[in-house]
Image: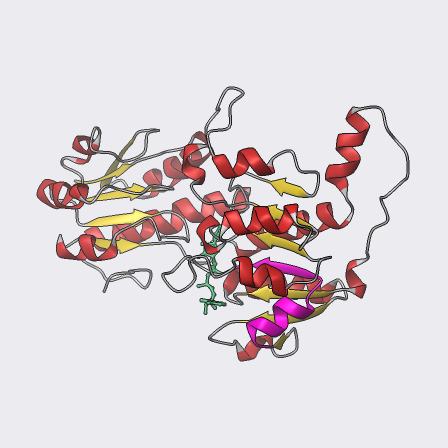
Amino acid sequence: MKKIFMYNLLNMEKPFVKHFAAQHPDVTFAGTPDKLTSKNVGLAKGADGISIHFNSPEKSLYSSLHKFGVKIIGVRQTGYNEVDLDAAKKNHLVVTNVPGYSPRSVAEMALTHVMYLLRHIGDIRQREAKGDFLWAGDEAREIHNLTVGVIGTGKIGGTSAKIYKALGAKVLGSDPYPNPQLKSTLTYVPLKTLLQTADVIVLHTPLLKSTRHMIGAKEFKLMKNSVIFVNVSRGAVVDTNALIDALKDHEIAAAGLDTIEDEGNTFNRDNKGTIPNQYIKQLINMPNVLITPHVAYDTDNSVKNMVEISLNDIYDVINGKSVKDQLNK
Ligand code: NAD
């Protein structure tokens, strides 16, 4: 009998795990709501594969997992920047992720941020809370009259671009690997041109060494002062101190953030009235900023796909098969 152990197992994931277990009686499943740490790595003893989610395992844990006989770490999300692929490889651990579980989920959240900010909803809500229902200052722009710049035109960015095109906007794209299938959707331009001409900028790149802080002070200065800037990729793709300065100095008009640097100390926690993250603390009360706690992925469709695709990969690897989602070949 094989065994799969799941860390950070969320209540909303349990029905899909139960369904998978019913279809795979040759595997036992166990899990904990806690993230994988040095304190609970022992729970993986006897497991053939483990499944993690929003987790940055300490370096020492990879050799512990190998010693326990674990063969695969299945990351049940798309972004895998938290996992040390080299340390995993050294310890003979296959690592997989779930690319494209539902690009639409993230693209629709980016659109939600864009529309919220375009229509000044943050400002309207703050004034309403004080009894001010005046019409002053709420004039918005219509998206079909605007140019939307999509940075990173992969699965999510490509889906996003098609949404803005369908809404009548002019769409520009920037990506080191342009996708010819998006030819009728967007026009590829150099990043500098996109930053200078777009009215709305949405960020859909992965966090890589080459993309860390790729949007910083220099890039914000190139943008229009009226730009709406939305990041639903990874917090550290943006230099957040530079973003805060750009907002304070009115170099950009508004920012929507589903991810933010060092978010782990604040997101997916009830912080009981406090905000541990210093960036969020500075941004949260700005009427022209919308922060959501890394929930762009969180739709019924996504959660089902993340669990099922990831468990399928783990199942195949522990049964000696190779899988297309392996990251460290
Ligand atoms: P993908 O691999 O399909 O696409 C990423 C694209 O970014 C690729 O086309 C790549 O060439 C491009 N890229 C790389 N470096 C670039 C650069 N310097 N400039 C412009 N483009 C660059 O990935 P995807 O499925 O579209 O996901 C993108 C990212 O979205 C993930 O890596 C993850 O970090 C993030 N994400 C966030 C959430 C959320 O809930 N907020 C959910 C899923 C994914």
Can residue 52 be seen here? The reply is: yes
Q: Position of residue 322 (x, y in %)?
A: 24, 62
Image height check: is 129 above or below 100? above
Q: From the image, which quarter does the N terminus lie in?
A: top left
Q: Position of residue 185 (x, y in %)?
A: 65, 73
Report the residue at 45% width, 45% height from top.
Answer: 261
Check the image and name the residue furthest to the front: 249
On screen, residue 190 versus residue 134, left or right, reads left
Check the image and name the residue furthest to the left: 67
Quarter of the view holding residue 142:
bottom right
Check the image and name the residue furthest to the right: 135
Image height check: is 114 above or below 39? below
Quarter of the view holding residue 131:
top right
On screen, residue 40 versus residue 9, left or right, reads left
Toward the viewer: 327 or 19?
327
Q: Position of residue 3 (x, y in %)?
A: 20, 39
Toward the viewer: 244 or 305?
244
Q: What span is in magenta?
A: 189-204
Toward the viewer: 158 or 126?
126
Q: How many marks?
A: 0
Whether residue 22 appears in magenta in the rendering, the answer is no
Can residue 319 be seen here? The reply is: no
Q: Position of residue 89 (x, y in %)?
A: 18, 57
Report the residue at 51% width, 42% height from top.
Answer: 294
Report the residue at 63% width, 60% height from top.
Answer: 201
Toward the viewer: 325 or 18?
325
Q: From the image, which quarter does the C terminus lie in?
A: bottom left
Check the image and name the residue furthest to the top: 272
